[in-house]
Amino acid sequence: MLGILLLIGTAIAALISTHYTIAPQAATSGGSRSYSSNNSNLSSSGQASSAKMTSANYINISGFAGSLLSGTDSTPPSIGNFKVDGEPVVDNDYVKSDGLLTATILDLDSAISQESSSISIDGTATALSALVSPNSYDALSGTLTYQLNLSDGEHTMILSARDTSNNSASLTRIVKVDSSGAKAANAFIYPNPYNPSNGNARIAYQLNQDADITLYLFNEINQLVWKRTYPSGSNGGSSGYNEIEWNGTTDFGQVAGNGAYFLRIVSGGKQIGRIKIAILR
């Protein structure tokens, strides 16, 4: 038994010294929104799982050693990089009705069982093995591609994965579709109060659909001091999360002075969102 343990230890040390590192478990952050690592919302037979890797540069050492000792794989698949039209999606985001969903479904210890893994839209599940063009699953890269066809309203999307060792995982996202006219939600600026001397501020908001957007910034006596326009489909005018940087400088070339400011989000001549900003230098 001692000889076996020494052999395992030598193998693991060789892997580490070559090009593997232990998988990180810290959450990553995008602006003000947090995106968990690639096994967000994973479930595996009722047990919490450790972080799962999504590239050949990472290996789960504990799972690898456990597999060598027991001869079985007990680590669930990894599901992550959930995006629609290339943008990360969190619960209650707006998406396009015909957006392109992409995600990665991987397992470093066993193969993914495509017959037992699926994508479910509002309770209707399709096995990965049953996907037809333009939808697909690439077993080599672990990339899932799925063309959405959603009606207005709230929708529940579930990715379920099972490997050939019968370990399972799932990831759920709840999204919204609204084609009744442009609307802005969850509009804010950070930091707020904002000191231009400390760097750029970030203006963020969600749109329910692609739309031509104009941002107007007024001072407290209702003078227009800054204006920007964003075409439909671009950052600032795209369905879902948008984030714009402002350096605190007005269109007159001056740094905004102390006081209250009001940002209006306008589309089609109508105000669809509003943010109050305090400048404190």
Image (tube, helix red, strand yellow):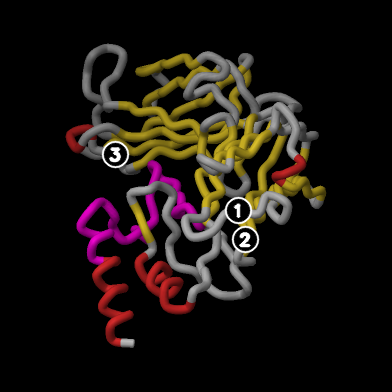
Q: Is residue 185 visible?
A: no
Question: Residue at left 45%, top 20%?
Answer: 216
Q: Quadrant of the C terminus?
A: top left
The residue where tag 1 is placed is 112
Residue 224 within the segment the image draws in magenta: no
If you read the primary sequence from the N terminus, does the residue marked by circle 2 or circle 3 appear first? 2
Kindly check if marks 2 and 1 are in contact, taking CB atoms under 8 A apart as contact.
yes
Amino acid of disc 2: Thr
Q: Residues within 10 Å of mark 2 (few under 14, many from 20)?
A: some
Quick one: SS at disc 1? loop
Question: What is the x, y in percent for residue 194?
Answer: 29, 39
Question: Residue at left 42%, top 78%?
Answer: 69
If you read the primary sequence from the N terminus, does the residue marked by circle 1 or circle 3 appear first? 1
Describe residue 253's horizontal placement relative to residue 130 as left or right. Answer: left
Question: Residue at left 39%, top 56%?
Answer: 27
Amino acid of disc 1: Ile
Q: Identify which residue, 16 or 14, lies in the foreground.
A: 14
Q: Magenta segment range?
A: 13-39
Kindly check if marks 1 and 3 are in contact, taking CB atoms under 8 A apart as contact.
no
**How many angstroms separate mark 2 from mark 1 (CA)?**
6 Å
**How many angstroms separate mark 2 from mark 3 (CA)?**
53 Å
Describe residue 87's horizontal placement relative to residue 156 as left or right. Answer: left
Q: Quadrant of residue 266?
A: top right
Amino acid of disc 3: Tyr
Describe residue 22's horizontal placement relative to residue 146 as left or right. Answer: left
The residue where tag 2 is placed is 164
Q: Residues within 10 Å of mark 1 (few under 14, many from 20)?
A: many
Question: Residue at left 41%, top 23%?
Answer: 217
